[in-house]
Amino acid sequence: MSAKMIYGDWTISQEGFDVRYLGKTESIMCLGNGYVGSRAAEEESYVGQSRDTFVSGTFNYFDENEVTELPNVPDVWGMDFQINGQPFSLLTGKIEAYKKTLDLKRGLLTREVSWSKDDVSLKMTFKRFISKKRRHFMASQVHIENLGSPVSISIKTGINGQVSNEGSQHFTEGEKGLVDGKILQMCPQTTHRKLDVVISVCHELKNVQATTRPEIGRRSFSMNFDFKLAENEQVSLEKRASIYTSIDNDSDNHSIQNMRNVAVSELQDLESQSFEELLAESTQAWAEIWQKHPIKIKSEDPRDQLAIRFAKYHLHSMVPAHDERMNIGAKGLSGQGYKGHTFWDTEIFMLPYFTFTHPEIAEKLLTYRYLGLAGAHKKAADNGYEGAQYPWEAAWPTDGEVTPVWGAADIVTGKAMKILSGFIEQHITSDVAFGVKQYLDVTGNQDFANEKAYEILIDTAKFWASRLEYDAPNDRYVITNVMGPDEYKEEIDNNAYTNYTAHWNISYVIDLIGHLKAEKPEVYARLDKEFNLEALKANLKAKVDKIFLPQPTSAGIIPQDDTYLTKPELDLTKYKSADGVDGLFHDYNLHQVNGFQVTKQADVLLLMLLFEGLFEKELKLKNFDYYEPKTTHDSSLSLSTHAILSADLGKLDQSYDFFKQAINIDMGEYMKSSDPGIHTASLGGIWQMVVFGYGGVRMIEGELRIEPNLPRAWSHLSYGFDYQGQAISVEIGEGKMVLTKAEGPALQFIHQDQIMNLEDTLTITL
Amino acid sequence: MSAKMIYGDWTISQEGFDVRYLGKTESIMCLGNGYVGSRAAEEESYVGQSRDTFVSGTFNYFDENEVTELPNVPDVWGMDFQINGQPFSLLTGKIEAYKKTLDLKRGLLTREVSWSKDDVSLKMTFKRFISKKRRHFMASQVHIENLGSPVSISIKTGINGQVSNEGSQHFTEGEKGLVDGKILQMCPQTTHRKLDVVISVCHELKNVQATTRPEIGRRSFSMNFDFKLAENEQVSLEKRASIYTSIDNDSDNHSIQNMRNVAVSELQDLESQSFEELLAESTQAWAEIWQKHPIKIKSEDPRDQLAIRFAKYHLHSMVPAHDERMNIGAKGLSGQGYKGHTFWDTEIFMLPYFTFTHPEIAEKLLTYRYLGLAGAHKKAADNGYEGAQYPWEAAWPTDGEVTPVWGAADIVTGKAMKILSGFIEQHITSDVAFGVKQYLDVTGNQDFANEKAYEILIDTAKFWASRLEYDAPNDRYVITNVMGPDEYKEEIDNNAYTNYTAHWNISYVIDLIGHLKAEKPEVYARLDKEFNLEALKANLKAKVDKIFLPQPTSAGIIPQDDTYLTKPELDLTKYKSADGVDGLFHDYNLHQVNGFQVTKQADVLLLMLLFEGLFEKELKLKNFDYYEPKTTHDSSLSLSTHAILSADLGKLDQSYDFFKQAINIDMGEYMKSSDPGIHTASLGGIWQMVVFGYGGVRMIEGELRIEPNLPRAWSHLSYGFDYQGQAISVEIGEGKMVLTKAEGPALQFIHQDQIMNLEDTLTITL
C-alpha cells in the first residue's frame, strides 16, 4: 500500500500507510495552540518516528558545546497495543484501509485504520486535539470496533519521558505520582535552566470491563488496560493530558506542588465534559480565527483555497500569542529542525500576516525583539560594534546569539562545516527594523512606537553606523565579509541586500530623530538620555550618503555582491526539476558552489520587492530575468518572493507556477520535504502571495497601495486586513474590486498612482 | 513464525523471528571480552530493541537524582538497509528462514536470514565478534546473496550516538572526524566524570561497485553504500570498529588525539588481515580459556554440558580481567539492568569459579574490593559505624554506596518504593570477607593476604563490632533493622544469615590477629598502625560470644529472623509454576508479602550451605524441608544454592530439578526472563552446581573436601581446579573418582571424613 495525499475543503489527508513517509504527516498535521505543539506521530511506535512535543519558550542546552533548543517534553500520545499478545504494528498483517486527516477548521487529527491479521479484524479510529481554548489541555480518543473473532487487547499508555532531542536529554527524570487512583503525573526539570514541567494524564476506558494496572519505569509512567472484545463489540479509550511549566505567565505560583494541584483540578473539573464537548469549545476558539479576515479564493484548483487555510492553521497553531517572551521558530512547534529558534523568517515572512490581520499578535512578536535588545547589545559589543545587533538565531529573548557554530559534514573533507550565519549574516538587524517599521505603518500604534519601536529602530541604526567600514581610497562606507539572504555566498563584500537595507535603516532614523524632536518631545527626551540623539544623528548623517549602494551594470544588473557577477555560471536545470532541494550538494560542496553564479534564494530580488520604490520596473524585470534562472530556491523563503515579484512584473503565469510550488513545499505530494518540521516562513509566504501578490496589497514608504493581479486560474478573491485600527474587506472579481469598511474615519490608499479615499464602500473597475 | 531455542554442543540458537522476544537473544547471545560488551541486537532496527554497548568501569551519573551507571556508548552494530527503496524489516515480507546463533567456542554471533518480498529474495548472513585477543577491537560482516530479481540496496551504517540509558544521556556529542577517507571517528565525553571515549569504524564493501557517501547527523556519523545486485550476485560488507577510553590501563597517553591516532593505526595495521583471520586469533584466545580446567558432562541431556559452556562463556565475556579497578555487574555487560553495579553476586556466586579456576582473575576482583575500602569507610562513617562497611551496590571502587534510593511503583499506592538495600542489606560486608577468606584458603596466596586480604578482613570485622547493638536485658549483641538475603523481609531484626556471618567475620579476625602477631610480625606491625590490633582484638573478644545466633526451635527450625516464624503462611503453588517470577507482585505489594512466611531466595539455607560445619545434617534437612516450599526463587541466586544443598542432603532428584531450572533461567525456552540482561550470579551458580554440587568440591573451614554426587542422568563428570597453586583434575564415573595433578608437593583433601593425600594420581571408589 503506498501513501498519497488527499485534499478537501478544510482537510488534508494521507491515504495509505508507508513507513518511509512518517515524517511528512507528523510535521504537516502537527497540532498546537501556540503554547504547546506536537507532531502527529502515530500512536503505536515505528522505527523512524519522531515523537516530539514542544512547549514554547522552554529552551535548554544539553551542554556547553550544544546550543539552546526547545526540549522534547515527555510524550503523552503514544500507545502500545497488544492484540492477542502480539504487538500491533501496521507493518504486520493487512491494512484494509488507512486514512490520516488533519481537519484544519477544528484542529482535529483523525486516523482511521482497518486492519486484519489471521482471524483478527479491527477498525480503529484515533482522534486527538490540542485545545485552542485551554492552553494547557489536550485530549485523545481511540475507538476500536471488533469486526473479526473475539480478541484480547492490551493497551499501555501514559507518560513517556524516554524521548529526547536526537539523543540529547534535556530533562531530569523528575518525581512521579498517582493522584486519585487515576491521574498520572510526571514532573521533569530542564537540566540547566531548571525549569519545572508538570505533565498529567488520565484515562477512561468505556464500554468494556478491563483489568487496570499502573506501571512505573525509568522515565515512564503508564496505565495498562487488559480486556477482551467479543465479535462486533466496541471499546473507547479516552485520554486527557495537560502540561504546565514554571515559566507559565498565567500563574504566579510555580511550585511543583501548586502546578500539580492546578493540573489535577483542571482534569477533575473537565471530567463531566465529553471529548466532543471539549473539542467543540476548542473548535469555537478556532472559529474566532477563521472568522477574522477570511480569505476566499475561487480557483480552477480548489487546493489554492486549502493552502491559505493550511497556512493560517499552522501560523496560529505555532504562534505564542499568549506570551511576548516567545516567538515563532523556523519549524514552529512541529519538529526539532532549527531547534525552535527564531530567524528573520518572522519579520520578513510571517509577521506581515499578523501585522495586517492580528496586530495584537504582531505587537507581541515585536515586543519579543524589544525584550531581545539586551541580547542584541551583547552581540554587538562582543563583535566590537555599538547599538543593537540582532542574533541570527534567537531563543529566549535575552540569550542573544544562539546560532550553532558547527553544522553538517562537508562532503569532500568529511569535516563538520562552520556555520557562519551567526557571525556574518547581519541583515537580520535591518530585517527586524523593517518589520517594526511596517507594523507602525500599518497599525499606527503610537504607544508601541513610543515605548518600544523607536528604540529598536534607533538602536539598529546605531549598530549599522558602527558596522560601516570606511573605504578611504573611494571615500565611501562599505560592508565587507557578510552573508546576504543567499547563504551560498559566504564571506562576501557589499551584499546589495545588506548595504541597501542598512542604508534604509540609517536614513529612516535620521528622519525619525528629527520627527521625534519636533513632534514627540517627551519620547525624544527619554531616548536622548540613552542615545545622545543629536550626536547619533550627526554620525548617521555623516555616513549615510557615503554608504556604497551597488548600482546597475550597463546591462542593468544590480550585483548581488562585489564578485558575484565575475563568477562562472552553472546550469541548474537538473537540480531545479528534482523533488528534493539538496541535489546540488551531492555534486558540489559549499565552497565550490560559492564559486558559481548560483543563488539559494531571492537576494537582490527580495530587496527589489521590499523596497520597490528604489528601482524602476524595467530594472526589476532585467534583474528578475537574470537572477531567477540562477536561483535554486533551495530555501522555502525563495518561492513566495519570486511569486509576488513576478506578479508585480506582470508575469502572472510564471507567478502562479511559483505559487503552486510554494504551497506544495509542505502541503504537496512530495513526501520527504517536511521531515524535520513544517516550513513556517513558507506559510507566511502563502498569505503574502495571496494578499500581497494577487490581492495587490503593499505598504510602501508608509503608504498603503492596493493593485490586484489575479492569476488566470482565479476568478474571484476576497480578503481582509486591519489598517490604522480599522478592518477593510476587499472583494476582487468580475473586473472590479470592491472595498468595504465599517464606520470610522476615511482611509486613503494608492491605486494605479491615484490616492483613493475609502469611507464605507468603494468599487474600482480593474 | 514463532521463535524457539535450539541447543547444540557449543551453540545456542533461536530459530524463527518474533519481535516480542528481541530481548532474549540480545542478552543471552551478548558478546564481550571483559573490556567491552554488547547486546546482540539485530542490525536493522525494531521498536523494543535495546542497542546497548558498555565499556567496563566507565560509570557516569546523569544528574544528582540518578545513581551512577554504565553508560550506553554509541552503537557500531546497527545497519539500515533499503531494499528497492523500502526499509528492510523482518516485520514486512516473508521470512523463509531465520536462525540466530551464538557460537560459545568462538564467541561468534551469526544470523542467517532468508527473506522475500514481492520479487525480492535475499539470503543475508550476519556475523560479528568482539575480539578476545584485542580488547578494543570488534568486527562484523554482512553477506547478501540475491536469490530473486535484480535489486537496489542501500546500506547506511556507522556510529550512532543517539542511544541512551532509557532516555538518560551520559555523553556529549563529541568531535567527529573522517580519517583517510574511510575511518569514521566519534569522540563523546561522559557528562560528569569527563571520561573521553574514541569510537572508530571503517567499512569495506566487497564484490560490487557502490556509491559511497559519508553522512554526518546529530550524534551520528555514517557511510552510505548504494549498489545494485544482479540475480545470483553476492556482496559482503565488512565493518571493523574499536573503542578506546581515557581510563584504559594499557596506555599512558589519554589525549583524544593520541587515542584517535592509536585507533587509526590499529585499524590500518589490521587491514591486511581478513575477517576470518581476526576471528581465528580471537577464537585462539577463547581456546586458552576452554583448555583450562575443561568440564565434561556425560548426561542423558546434552544441554547440561552446554550449560557449563554457556556459563563459562558469559563469565569470561563480562569479567574485566584486564583491570582491577572494575568488577562484574549483576547483568555483566549484557544490559542496563542493575546499572552495571556489583553486588554480593560476585563474592558468593561468581568469585568461586574464578578462585578455583582462574585465581589471577579472582585476585583482581578482590583487589577491586581492596580499592573499595575507601568507599566502605565512607559508608560506615556516614552511618555512624567504624571500619569498612561495603556498599550494597558498587561501581567505581572509590564511589562507595551507589544503590538507588527509589525503585519501581508500589502497585497499591502508585508511589515509587524506597529501596532499602543500600541502607540495611548489610550482609554484603561479611560476603566480601567470605570471598576473601575462600580465596586465601584455595590459593594460599600470601602476597595478596599480606598486602590486601588481611586488611579487608580486619576492617570488616571492625565494622561488625561497631555495628552490633547491645541488648542489655539479655546481655547480648543483636543486629536489628536489616535485610537478609531474603529481600522480601525488610527492616527485620536478627536475620540469621547476617548474625552468623558477622559472628564468623569477628571470630575469624580474632584468630587472625593472634596468627599475625605470632607468624607475620611485619604484617602485624603495619596493620597495627592502622587498626591498633590489640585493642581491636579485645573489643572483638568482648563481643563475639555475646552475639545472638538464632537457635533452632523445638521443631529444629532456625528462625530466619525474630518474627518470620510468627507470620502466616501462603500457598505459593500458583506462583511457583508460572514462567515469570513476578506473579506474586501482581497480587500483593511488598508490604503485604513482608507479612507472610514467604522467602525470595535461600537465606537460612544459604547460611547452611556456606557454613555447613555449624549445622548437623538432620537440622539442615529439617530447615530445607521447611524453607524451600516457602521460597519463590524470585531471584536467580536461589536455585543454585538449593541445588547444591539438596545434593548434599542426598535429595539428588530434587537437586537435578533445581539444576534444570537454574540453567534455564537464561538459556531456557522461556523468552522473557532475560530482557534487562543475563543473570550473572546464576552463571556462577551453574559452575558451582556442577563442581561444588555434583563434583562435590567444597572449601570448608580451610580444608578442601571432595565428595561427588552425580545425579542419575549423569554417567560421567570431569572437571579441574587450581588448589594451592597446583592444578587438579577430577574424573568421576563408573563408580570411581580419579584425581590427577602434575608434579609438585602432595596435596591433602578430605573425603568421607578421611584425609586423602594426592601426589600424582589417586583413584577413589565411590
Image (cartoon, coloured by chain):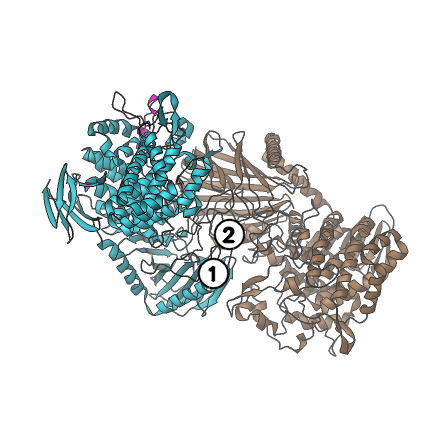
Chain colours: A brown, B cyan
Range shown magenta = B556-578
Of all chains, the one bearing label 1 is B
Q: Nearer the viewer, residue A503 or B426?
A: B426
What residue is shown with label 1?
B186
Task: Give the farthest residue toward the right.
Answer: A518
Q: Residues within 10 Å of mark 2 (few under 14, many from 20)?
A: some
Image vertical order of residue A356 relative to residue A596, above or below: above
Q: Nearer the viewer, residue A697 or B537?
A: B537
Q: Is residue B389 magenta?
A: no
Left or right of A703? Residue B740 is left
Left or right of B638? Residue A357 is right
Residue B177 x %, y %: 49, 65
What residue is shown with label 2?
B191
Residue A586 x %, y %: 53, 68
Q: Amino acid at mark 1?
A: Met
Sequence-wise, the earlier of marks 1 and 2 is 1
Q: Amino acid at mark 2?
A: Thr
Q: Is residue B568 magenta?
A: yes
Of all chains, the one bearing label 2 is B
Asked which quadrant contains residue A555, the reply is bottom right
Image vertical order of residue A661 relative to residue B532, above or below: below
Magenta highlight: main SS: loop
Q: Secondary structure at mark 1?
A: strand
Gap between marks 1 and 2 measured at Cα:
15 Å
Q: Nearer the viewer, residue B153 or B684?
A: B684
Q: What is the quadrant of the C terminus of chain B in the image?
A: top left
Q: Are marks 1 and 2 on the same chain?
A: yes
Residue B563 x %, y %: 36, 23
Asked whether residue A711 is in view, the answer is no
